[in-house]
Amino acid sequence: MLQDTSAQEANTNVDLLFIGAGPVGLFGAYYAGFRGLSMAVVDALPEVGGQVQAIYPEKKIYDIAGLPGVPGQELIGNLVRQAAPFSPLYLLSQQVQRLERRDGGWRATTSAGVVVDARAVVITSGVGAVTPRPIPAGEDFLGRGLCYFVPRLDVLDGKDVVVVGGGDSAVDWALAALPRARSTTLVHRRRQFRAHEHSVQLLHQSACTVLVDANVTELRGRDRVESVAVKVAGEAEVRETKAQVVVAALGFLMNLGPIKDWGLELEGRAIRVDSRMRTNLPEVFAAGDAATFDGKVKLIAVGFGEVATAVNNAAVALDPQAGLAPGHSSDLTLPAQVGA
Amino acid sequence: MAFVIGEPCVDVKDMTCIEECPVDCIYEGERMLYIHPSECIDCAACEPVCPVEAIKPAQHVDDRWRPFQESAKSAFDVLGSPGGSTKVDPPIEDTEYVKNFEKH
């Protein structure tokens, strides 16, 4: 959805760093901009939207205040548009690994080697970084033919493509590969697909080789993937299928990752906060599913309120002269106010 | 509050739900599967994929599912919170309730 605007920035200075670009992080970015704070938003996924975009983009959500029924994808699109006038810096496909105190602020180093110096941090990481479920055969060939997302469809052109998985993503990738690839094979370890019935019908009617009750046992090749070994239930021999592109679409896992090593007071997957959304670390706040306190209810609507609270309290922490209350949103003149 | 797997799973163990779960909180027992009550993040990804409709959210647990809800809690008395089903070797021990359960 959004292009990663980061890559060239080796070192960045912002007022607020949001860890997690799910709905709560995105709304936080809007609020930070509204308070005149510069911000960066980091996320492990290549797209913003967190769990909503990754796991249920088409599902209608009924309990967002003011929206009687909104598909997840649309909610995320709206949040991106809402924050856009403030030009958030999105650092995607990377996780914050180290968070170190520095000059009264925080230095975050990401898995992509990007360094962000922020005066305050808001952790909006939900139940943890959303990462693709690894393919059981091993990740040695990641980036050398094995991928979890297909960044551009033309990487499939003229290739022997193997897609692994049984959900909508896997079936969609197989269908997308068919007109472009030299050959397309789908490998699913069960007999039943979890994808939309219509897509599965299209799949079975197509030229795609569909192997069910089958597992990829090995990826083979030298510098890049050259073939995959597939064990189909009931067959004595393992099949070898030529492949230069292997797309593993096995769903997602959520892991707390490095967050658990930063000295935060944790309760299970969540970080303990006070009524200002402050964690036990100075100038580090948390909001959304990532935050917990007595009586916490994990709802997107609640997370929205919490991140607005966090940002407004962070604004005061960064500038004691600033008021806690942000003022009316209609009073602010923007270069490009959406919906004005 | 977590989701609860009930009677339809017993002696079936389809396991599609395990593939869907993003936090690996569904553990394989001998006769049925167990959702870990505190590791479950209530994302509801498992519920629609069960081919025998064995999964209900805690809020919708009725008299038939309630004993399974209690059973799932006690299933982890000894194991605690392993942090994911890949961290334990299946199967985990069935609870007394499940061991003695007579399926109709």
Image (spheres, rainbow, N blue to C red):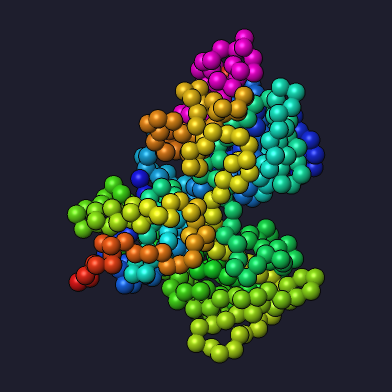
Residue A245 magenta-drawn? Answer: no
Residue A96, position as x, y percentages in the image:
67, 41
Residue located 48% across and 38% down the image: A267
* Residue located farthest toward the bottom when viewing the structure as drawn: A236
Out of A97 and A178, give the one closest to the viewer.
A97
Residue B51, position as x, y percentages in the image:
35, 68
Residue A34 visible in the picture: no
Does residue A286 appear left or right of residue A177 in this picture? left
What range of the chain is rendered magenta? Answer: A305-331
Does residue B78 appear left or right of residue A189 in this picture? left
Residue A102, position as x, y percentages in the image:
74, 27
Residue located 50% across and 22% down the image: A276
Residue B42, position as x, y percentages in the image:
40, 48
> Is A231 placed above or below A11 here?
below
Does residue A228 appear left or right of residue B70 in this picture? right
Residue A316 magenta-drawn? Answer: yes
Does residue B14 appear left or right of residue A146 in this picture? left
* Most frequent secondary structure within the magenta stretch: helix
> Is A125 placed above or below A188 here?
above
Q: Can you tell which quarter of the image residue B102 is in?
A: bottom left
